Image (cartoon, helix red, strand yellow):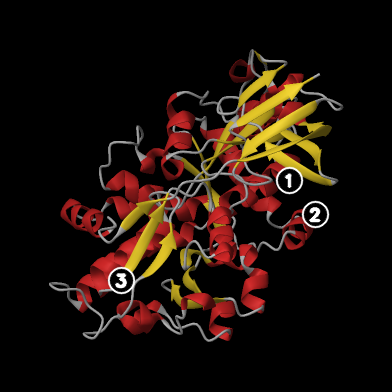
């Protein structure tokens, strides 16, 4: 029997809860999380440029996830381009506060980059706290009809130029096809995003691209319907129902003695493609830094999962034609941990196979200069809309990478107001501006 002495100075309910496991600490933790996030503004750091798949999914999350986090904080997206997401992750781990207010919209290829010992990452990828992914990605390699390619077999006979945006699937897949299976892809590197590659395909500057199917079908939807672009192969460990319905063959069909580079066996090709494609399960991954308090990580993971069942979120995703397939943070944590257990010598071999060794050129992006009256400045100048020859043109304005001037003097993007005359210097409408030149 509990005595009065035992209860002295202690609330009886707290003692009883501790004895029978009612979880008072968990309740207190939930309250603490809500108190912390209430009134906060979170940031989603996007490790890729505007207009591509990672960017689209990240901005979708930014519009909805705050509604499911205790305290209902607001969330703003910020592009931080460089080294296929490594720059953004370095910032999240080494410069940003590790308190759960900065979420990384990372690229799925980053675990491989990290495990292969490249010098760029200043973090241990398996120490990140993964929140989950919004899709389970299949990859695709596709060429334009104008290139003359009818099937993947053609790339083993003739050279075709594909576009690359950095050390990610746009360059890894063509490298693996060349180095393991004897394909003859050429690489044109330096495109800011896959959206820019698709524009280059339409202009006839490149023959095709390798990327995620989700982004490919969104960016190239009309070209697919018109028969101007042909998906040649599913770069995935499991079939995608949409590509299967289109008759696109699986990668595994080409693992045979007929399609092998010198010195490579079928087992080699299977092993190295598999190590690479495991990351596809991560799809569109999101994470927070290693030192974020456990209670906040748990709350963010719960919010992430709840968001994927939110009718408003799903309606928004359907509106922008993005498929949603949840992969939980725990699942990604396990995938990355399993990759970390692979022998170092295999990663060393894979690193070599992921290097593009064929003919390579660097694209020269022609910057456009569009001048017009500012119609709208959104979110403190993060997006500016001008009237250019009677049409609305917008540009993403970076606080650190866009040079902003007002009446010839250095200025902040927040100083740009409706009615001013501004010039965008950018690769295309909707992209990040290199310069924003304004006059009162």
Label 3's element?
A: loop
Judge the density around disc 2: few (<14), some (14-19), many (≥20) Cα neighbours within 10 Å.
few
Q: Pointers 1 and 2 in contact (CB under 8 A)?
A: yes
Residue at (69%, 28%) from the top-left corner? 41
Q: Can residue 239 be seen in this view?
A: no
As displayed, is residue 314 above or below residue 376?
Answer: below
Tag 2 secondary structure: helix
Name the residue: 66% across, 33% down. 30
Looking at the image, is mark 1 or mark 2 earlier in the sequence? 1
- When asked about the image quadrant of residue 399, the answer is top right
Residue 238 position within the rendered picture, expressed as x and y whole percent measured from the top left: 45, 75
Residue at which label 1 appears:
64
Q: Where is residue 77 in the image (x, y as percent from the top left)?
A: 65, 37
Count all numbered tags in the image, as a single digit. 3
308 vs 400, nearest the viewer = 400
Q: Nearer the viewer, residue 379 or 163?
A: 163
Examine the rendered structure and indicate whether residue 376 appears above or below residue 199.
Answer: above
Q: Earlier in the sequence, mark 3 or mark 2?
A: 3
Residue 272's tag is none
Using residue 74 as the reference point, say whether residue 214 is left or right of it: left
Q: Which mark is residue 312?
A: 2
Q: CA gap, disc 3 to disc 2?
A: 45 Å
């Amino acid at each position: 029997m509990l005595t009065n002495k035992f209860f002295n100075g202690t609330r009886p309910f707290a003692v009883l809860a501790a004895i029978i496991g009612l979880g008072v600490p968990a309740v207190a933790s939930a309250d603490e999380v809500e108190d912390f996030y209430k009134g906060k503004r979170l940031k989603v750091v996007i490790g890729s440029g505007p207009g591509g798949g990672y960017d689209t999914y990240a901005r979708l999350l930014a519009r909805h996830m705050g509604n499911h986090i205790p305290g209902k904080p607001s969330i703003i997206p910020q592009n931080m381009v460089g080294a296929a997401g490594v720059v953004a992750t370095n910032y999240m781990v080494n410069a940003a506060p590790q308190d759960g207010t900065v979420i990384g919209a990372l690229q799925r290829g980053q675990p491989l980059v990290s495990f292969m010992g490249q010098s760029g990452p200043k973090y241990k990828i398996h120490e990140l706290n993964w929140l989950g992914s919004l899709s389970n990605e299949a990859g695709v390699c596709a060429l334009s009809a104008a290139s003359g390619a009818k099937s993947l077999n053609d790339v083993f006979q003739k050279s075709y130029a594909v576009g690359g945006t950095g050390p990610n699937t746009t360059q890894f897949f063509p490298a693996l096809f060349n180095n393991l299976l004897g394909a003859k892809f050429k690489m044109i590197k330096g495109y800011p995003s896959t959206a820019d590659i698709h524009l280059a395909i339409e202009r006839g500057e490149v023959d095709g691209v390798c990327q995620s199917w989700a982004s490919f079908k969104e960016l190239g939807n009309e070209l697919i319907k018109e028969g101007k672009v042909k998906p040649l192969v599913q770069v995935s460990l499991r079939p995608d129902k949409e590509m299967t319905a289109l008759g696109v063959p699986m990668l595994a069909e080409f693992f045979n003695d007929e399609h092998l580079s010198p010195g490579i066996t079928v087992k080699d090709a299977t092993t190295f493609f598999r190590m690479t494609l495991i990351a596809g399960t991560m799809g569109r991954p999101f994470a927070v830094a290693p030192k974020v308090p456990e209670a906040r990580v748990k709350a963010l993971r719960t919010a992430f999962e709840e968001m994927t069942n939110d009718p408003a979120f799903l309606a928004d995703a359907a509106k922008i034609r993005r498929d949603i397939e949840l992969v939980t943070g725990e699942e990604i944590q396990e995938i990355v941990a399993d990759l970390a257990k692979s022998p170092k010598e295999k990663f060393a071999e894979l690193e070599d196979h992921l290097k593009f060794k064929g003919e390579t050129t660097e694209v020269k992006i022609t910057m456009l200069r569009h001048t017009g009256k500012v119609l709208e400045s959104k979110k403190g100048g993060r997006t500016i809309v001008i009237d250019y020859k009677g049409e609305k043109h917008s540009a993403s304005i970076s606080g650190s990478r866009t040079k902003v001037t007002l009446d010839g003097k250095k200025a902040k993007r927040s100083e740009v107001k409706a009615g001013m005359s501004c010039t965008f210097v950018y690769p295309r409408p909707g992209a990040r501006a290199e310069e924003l030149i304004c006059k009162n």
